[in-house]
Image (cartoon, coloured by chain):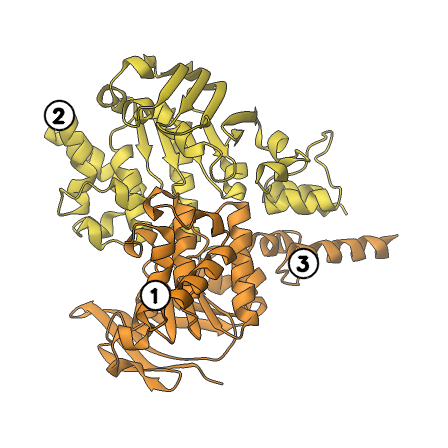
Chain colours: A yellow, B orange
Amino acid sequence: MKKVIVEHLKYRYPQAETLALDDLSFEVDEGEMIGIIGRNGAGKSTLCQALVGLVPHFYRGAYGGRVTVAGLEVLKSSVGRLSAKVGIVFQNPFTQVTGAKWTVYEEVAFGLENMGVPRKEMIERVDFALHLLGLEDVKDRNPFELSGGQAQRMAIAGVIALKPEIIVLDEPTSQLDPQGTEEVFRAIHRLSEEGMTVILAEHKMEKIARYCNRVLLLDEGKLIQFDTPAAVFSREDLMRFGVAPPVYTRVCRELDARREGSSHFPVTLEEACEVLKGR
Amino acid sequence: MIRIAVKDLSFSYRPGEEVLKGITLEFDGRSTAIVGQNGSGKTTFAKLLKGLLKPTRGEISILGRPANQMTAAALAPYIGLVFQNPNDQIFKSTVLDEVMFGPLNIGEDLERAKEKARQALEMVGLGDRAAENPQDLGLSEKKRVCIASIVAMEPEILILDEPTIAQDHAGVAIVRRVIGELKERGKLVMAILHDMDFVAENFERVIVFHRGTVLADGDPREIFSRRELLERTGLEAPHITRLGWSLGRRETYLTEAEFIQAMRMERGKGR
């Protein structure tokens, strides 16, 4: 089932002269995990906001084309209505904190309270989200006392608790240590395997290659390619779009080590190992 | 020359919960990466060096000065700290004013402060953004404004808290160049980092923090060779190092070039 349908989406911020998103069309199936890549300014964050309706409802500006998420047409649906189906985790976790709650536990429950979820279920969902993101130890802390990494996981937990059909994450691991990053990727990958559709903008290409089934490459608001990690990361001209492929792909290209029976290069540690082992 | 000497440094935000436990370290001119899990005390340590926090126990000497007894303002000409979150640092309404603020406050005149600010902005790739409001910039650019703000003050010691956050490929290259240039100018560059590829390529010394203590201290090859240590502290070796291990190599490769060269040499031998 198609969870996201984007048709000829064009968008310009108020007072901007150029299009932030320029004629994008693509579709995403239920349970897919999609990585959005591209240089800063390519339109990744804007696309994230367009999927949850903040573009155009909050930012205004000039909008064309159609975006449909979980069966709702974004332009004709309020952000509130959309938020029951599609959740977003902002790039800077501190902009996501409500400032209205004294504990991490309550902060994670905030969205659920606003949706009128029954108390018993609310407790279950908050506990589930805290456990998934490894936040049990800090659940009684003040949200503003958290480290960057903890705040980032709290922001994700708050959205996971809402059980959206689609979750959009804008650089969700920028403040996390390697272990925290890996844990977050594993957690959202598990959710995608359970049927949640995941779309994330990220600079950590090794993680994208490992966990995403498709990669959407943006540049200057245009969709350059939407394909498997192997196809996108094997592009010879990838650097022209301000993106370096994973380390594994770079060294295999340098050594001209392609995947067996394919013109593509390895993109993960395991693939690189397999190809290089026989040498 | 020892630029920073830390002796038996302890700190707690709440009584009874020590965030740093008796840290003793010396810093010479080597560029130093401080790594460790979130919550291991790295940022707290940086704030103590900068004088933003006062130790509950122990001594800090910055360029021979007793930092414990000095205010952050008095230390400002000697040591600069780029905050982890740019929004905690930025408060002026133009990028240029933001970067001039530091130099002005350590006694530079207006012209000189402006010149230093412009040079620093060029260095971080934001020379053409000087008139903009920093709040209108993206997170990656804000981070580089913060780096420029400290560079413009020309302190002997610079601490960068997660300088590569939100940077794309080009941004990381700029940060790499800035660190290189500061090293060339003889500055002590310290950075708190989670990106081990970047650590391996750019730093001469790596210090591993773990639960408020220093668990290891050495050059990158030494540290990244210790698989058991990395696992125990939730750290990852650089991607290229891991590829080498997975292929059963004994050597610890730190850069792609090293790895490629080793692979090529071996292939040459096989023929």
User: Of residues B68 and A154, which is closer to you in this image?
Assistant: B68
Give, as a three-letter code, the residue at label 2: Gly
- The residue that mark 3 highlights is B249
Rendered location of residue B116, percent (x, y): 44, 64
The chain letter for the residue carrying disc 3 is B
How far apart marks 2 and 3 lie (CA) works out to: 57 Å
Q: Secondary structure at mark 1?
A: helix
User: Is residue B233 something that shows in the picture?
Assistant: no
Q: Nearer the viewer, mark 1 or mark 2?
A: 1
- Which residue is tagged 1? B102
Camera-side mark, 2 or 3 = 2
Viewer-nearest of labels 1 and 3? 1
Kindly state the secondary structure of the residue where label 2 is placed.
Answer: loop
Identity, as a three-letter code, of the amino acid under mark 1: Gly
Residue A157 falls in image quadrant: top left
Q: Chain of mark 2?
A: A
On screen, residue A253 versus residue A76, left or right, reads right
Mark drawn on residue A116: 2
